[in-house]
Amino acid sequence: MESAHIGVHPLWHLYGWTFHSDTLISAWIVTAVLLSFAIFIRTILQMRPGLLQSTVELGVDSINGILVERMGEKGRKYFPFVATLFLFIICSNWLGILPFDLKPPTADLNTTAGLAILTIILVQAFGMIEKGPIRYFKRFFEPHPLFFPLNVIEEMAKPLSLSVRLFGNIFGKETIIVILSGLVALPLIYPIPILALSLLIGAIQAYIFMLLSIFYISMALEGH
Amino acid sequence: MTIQMMSVLGAAFGLAIVAFASALAQGFATGKAVEGISRQPEARGPIMTALIIGMSFIESLTLYALLVAIILIFVNPFK
């Protein structure tokens, strides 16, 4: 049965490291698509924007709007990071509906854990750069020094929930599609509603990941 | 009944209970948010943001249960 292949990745062994080859190849494809799109957009920039440029400007403006709304004008400098997260995750999620044998990189816990750990480390770094290390670490001892273990656990739970949320949604969607395609009757018809739903899930999860990153950054920046 | 069968049953029942509770919680949250929007339509943006963040926190608990279920079914520690 097909469902026996759920969660099994073809492996590459290289210099003592083990790679999930399908995840790696899909992530490279997403990166290549995003890079070439960015370079293409750069070449067609003009003063009177066309349809494509207007669409991209609309997206840039709305992400900038969220940042400015939460953090004020200083939020603009975190735009490149959160926009890259959003674009990478949404392209990865939507890779699963293309009619090729590509798995979304986000259906692998390693990818999402990497993104979440990167986000949390950068949040600490942003907080330290913005407020200075000593004033930043005071955050862990508030409202009382006894709360230090609780604050540390809260900080540790952030990457866990970020990564498991994205992974669980995308992996669950992929699993349902595989199981529905394995049905004996009408295997081409049944997955269609789930495929339509997966477009929505992919976009919402990318949006939530970006929104929570902005939320965590702004929480690290504010305070006394 | 082998321990394998019991793990599958445990995973299924655990997910069912968690899905029930999380659907209930998300229903409450959406209902309150829609109430707020209909009372004050100009506050739609902030309400939606708060709703989505709250929803994602509710959902993450469901997904922890999903993770446990996946571990029980595919990488069973008692194999």
Image: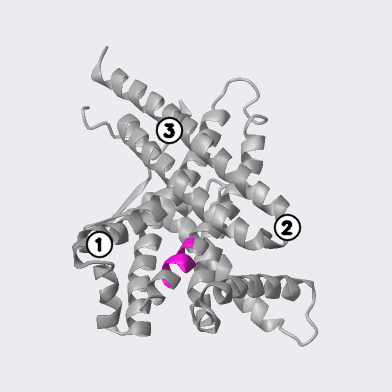
- What is the x, y in percent for residue A167? 43, 48
* 10 Å crowding of disc 3: few (<14), some (14-19), many (20+): some
Which stretch appears magenta? Answer: A212-217
- Residue at point 71% right, 83% down? A45
Circle 2 is placed at which residue position?
B41
Q: Provide the chain ID for the residue under circle 1.
A: A
**Disc 3: host chain:** B
Point 48% across, 37% down: residue: B22
Q: Position of residue A130 (x, y in %)?
A: 38, 83
The Cα–Cα distance between marks 3 and 1, rounded to whole angstroms, is: 27 Å
In this picture, residue B22 sits left or right of residue B37? left
Q: Mark 2 Cα within 10 Å, few/some/many (few <14, many 20+)? A: few
Q: Nearer the viewer, residue A182 or A70?
A: A70
Which residue is denoted by mark 1 in the rendering?
A: A152
Q: CA distance from mark 2 to mark 1?
A: 39 Å
Q: Measured along the vertical axis of the image, is residue A71 above or below residue B36?
A: below
Q: Position of residue A200 (x, y in %)?
A: 63, 48
The disc at residue B18 is 3
Q: Residue flagged by tag 1: what amino acid is it?
A: Val
Q: Is residue A161 visible?
A: yes
Q: Amino acid at mark 3?
A: Val
